Image (tube, rainbow, N blue to C red):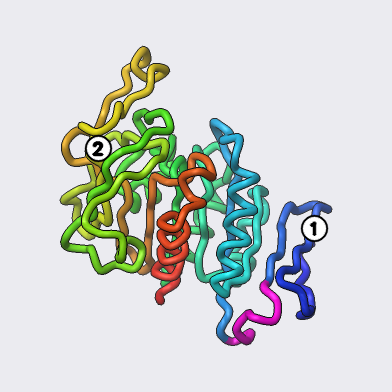
Amino acid sequence: MNQRLASRPLALVITLAVAGSCIAWITAGQNTPNSEQVKRILVFSGTGWFRHPEIPKTNGWLARTLAEAGYSVDISETAKDITPGRLDEYQVLVMNNANALIDLLDEKERLAIEAWYKKGRGVVALHAALVHQTNWKWFTELAGCDFNSDSDFLKAKVVIDPNNKEHPAVAGFGPEFSYSADWTNHDRSVGGLPGIKVLFRVDESTFEPVRDYFKTRGGKAIGKDHPAAWIREHGGGRFFYTELGHDLRSLDTKFGRKHVVEGVRWAGGR
């Protein structure tokens, strides 16, 4: 049972409700804006396929980081929490490596997300949220692609798209820089797809884009045009995706924190 707590003079208040629902309510303390200003975020980290080991750590990081940015954050891994009434409480849904959702969410739950999004809400998808989603037609069309393979945790050259260099999720770090992450190869490049604005690309000549596991299983690099973060205003709402988030090392940096917080702000309409 999810229960809001009264404000307390603490830096952070965390309540875990574990009876029938695994939702965590996070709220900032005295430095939080008033209740009319605070936006609520639902982080969903349920998985239908591979379970990334650092999902719990990333959930905690998201809760702390977004609370510091003035948001109230709930966390769930339970499909039955995805109802129209509950979703209406949130402005943004953050999918933390929530893959293969066709095998986790039933049709009613998927339709609830679609209807909620079309009301002008936002989806933020981290890393493996675009893995094995092709059977959920609406989501795959919104995102623009699905998964093929990925790299090991490697340093690569990041190149900011000059057309979107002023977007807050990438602004302030220069036109290119080195950054380490597990980089994802999608089944196609979203560059040039209608409505998609690429925030940054990775230069595949600066790292090995396909790790050994996938080399023996038909894994392929994307190629010269390798978008690694993008946004899309489509179908009534806003969609933000980043390849960062396989593990906490790719997020818990100055760039990673700003990238995710500003992605959430944009998805929420700010």
Q: Is residue 70 above or below residue 186?
A: below
Q: Residue furthest right?
A: 19
Label 1: how many residues lie within 10 Å, few (<14), some (14-19) or many (20+)? Answer: some
Count of numbered circles on the image: 2
Q: Position of residue 139 (x, y in %)?
A: 40, 49
Please state which amino acid type lies under the numbered disc 2.
Arg
At 30% from the left edge and 26% from the top edge, which residue is drawn?
Answer: 208
Q: Which mark is residue 188?
A: 2
At 22% from the left edge and 63% from the top edge, which residue is drawn?
Answer: 164
Q: Under tag 2, what secondary structure? A: loop
Q: Nearer the viewer, residue 30 or 269?
A: 30
Q: Is residue 226 above or below residue 165?
A: above
Q: Nearer the viewer, residue 13 or 253?
A: 253
User: Considering the image in quadrants, where does the C terminus appear?
Assistant: bottom left
User: Considering the image in quadrants, where does the N terminus appear?
Assistant: bottom right
Q: Position of residue 107 (x, y in %)?
A: 53, 48
Instruction: Name the residue tied to disc 1.
Output: 17
Disc 1 + disc 2, Cβ < 8 Å: no
